[in-house]
Every structure is written in C-alpha cells, then in structure tokens.
Amino acid sequence: ENRLGRKQILGRAEGGYYLTVQIEPGSDGRGSRGMVAVTQLPGAPQPQTRETIAHWRRLLPAGTQITSHLQAQDNGRFATHLVALNRHGEQLNAQRLGAALREQGYALERSISTDSAQTAAGLPEQAAGLTLLFRGPGKEAMATITRDAQGQTSIVLLTSVQLELLP
C-alpha cells in the first residue's frame, strides 16, 4: 500500500504474478478512476496446464497415467504434488524420474529402499519401494515409488521451490 500524490496504489503477489491497482479521484470530482496492472514475476512457476501433464507423461516410462497433479503457493514457496501409476518396476521409474529432475536442476541426495529398511528393522516384507530425496539451489523434491502385489507401481512426487523475492 502506498500513496503517490492523489493516487492510492495497492499491490501484492498472487501465484506467479504481481497485481497492482492504482485508484485516484475522478477528474470531475465525482467517482474514482482506476488502473490495474498484472506483471509476471521472474522465475515464478507457471500454472498447471494440459501441456504440463503431457510433459510429465513423456518424461516417465511409457504407459504412465498421471492421476493427480496439484500446485500450491504458500509462504514464499511453490509446491507441486504429482501422482502417477504404471506397471514398470521401481528401478526404471526411479531412473526416469531422476533424469527428469536432473534436467530441472535437482541432484539425488539420498535413495532409501523400503526392502532394506524393513529387513533391518526386523519387519515382514511388504510391497517393494524406494524413497528418493533430491535437492537443488532453493528447491527440494521427494519421491516415493512403490509396487503392489498386482504389479501396479505408484509414483508420488513432492517438490518445493523457494520463490524469488523482488527488491
């Protein structure tokens, strides 16, 4: 919120955009005159589109179905939640997902196999699975890849990116 002469100026970031509203008294002394400006923020992720889902389908193994793709912005961070299903093994899915995330500036930090974690804890083996942790400058991602007894593999990917703040 700011004043510039007779003009009241309001602004705020919303999604990947900065909205500005400028209001001033009308020239004839009645009413008000306003102007609205919308500016795309540099480095801000774009809203979800069909192209985004098609892009993920191309990056993951053939036959993958994207069942959910959600995006949210909160407290200066942009987050995505992707759920995909296919019939490929955990390793192939991990390789393809890892390659896709490397192209986006992430590096694999840690890989945890649920098989070895269950065995080490003395628990009975259940569905096989992997948890992958990735990091990049100002961002992080976590993926879980599990395969059930019927051969259905689910991939759940969570990403979080710190949005750039304007000076």
Image: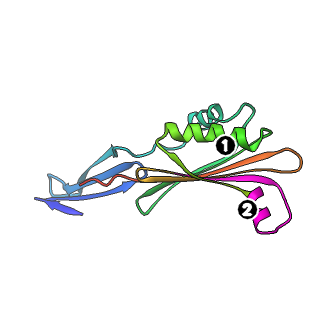
Q: Residue at x 59, y 41 (%)?
A: 98
**Residue 128 located within the stretch drawn in magenta:** yes
Indicate the secondary structure of the residue bearing disc 1. Answer: helix
Indicate the secondary structure of the residue bearing disc 2. Answer: helix
Residues tagged 1 and 2 counted as in contact (Cβ below 8 A): no
Q: Which residue is mark 1?
A: 94
Viewed as shown, does residue 55 lie left or right of 5? right
Q: Name the residue type under label 2.
A: Ala
Is disc 2 surrounded by few (<14), some (14 to 19) or many (20+) residues within 10 Å? few
**Where residue 140 appears, x then y in whole percent?**
50, 53
Q: Residue at x 37, y 44 (%)?
A: 43
**Where residue 48 appears, x then y in whole percent?**
54, 43
Q: Nearest the camera: 159 or 95? A: 95
Q: Nearest the camera: 138 or 116? A: 116
Q: How is the image coloured?
A: rainbow
If the image is split into quadrants, where does the N terminus sit?
bottom left
Q: Name the residue type under label 1.
A: Ala
Q: Residue furthest right?
A: 150
User: Mark number for residue 52?
Assistant: none
Q: Residue furthest left?
A: 5
Q: Is residue 93 visible?
A: yes
Q: Quadrant of residue 125?
A: bottom right
Q: Residue furthest front?
A: 120
Q: Residue at x 82, y 55 (%)?
A: 127
Is disc 1 surrounded by few (<14), some (14 to 19) or many (20+) residues within 10 Å? many
Sooner in the amino-acid sequence: mark 1 or mark 2: 1
Look at the picture and state if 134 lies above or below 89.
below
Q: Which residue is mark 2?
A: 117
Q: Quadrant of residue 90?
A: top right
Which residues make up the magenta segment? 115-134
**Where residue 160 appears, x then y in whole percent?**
50, 54
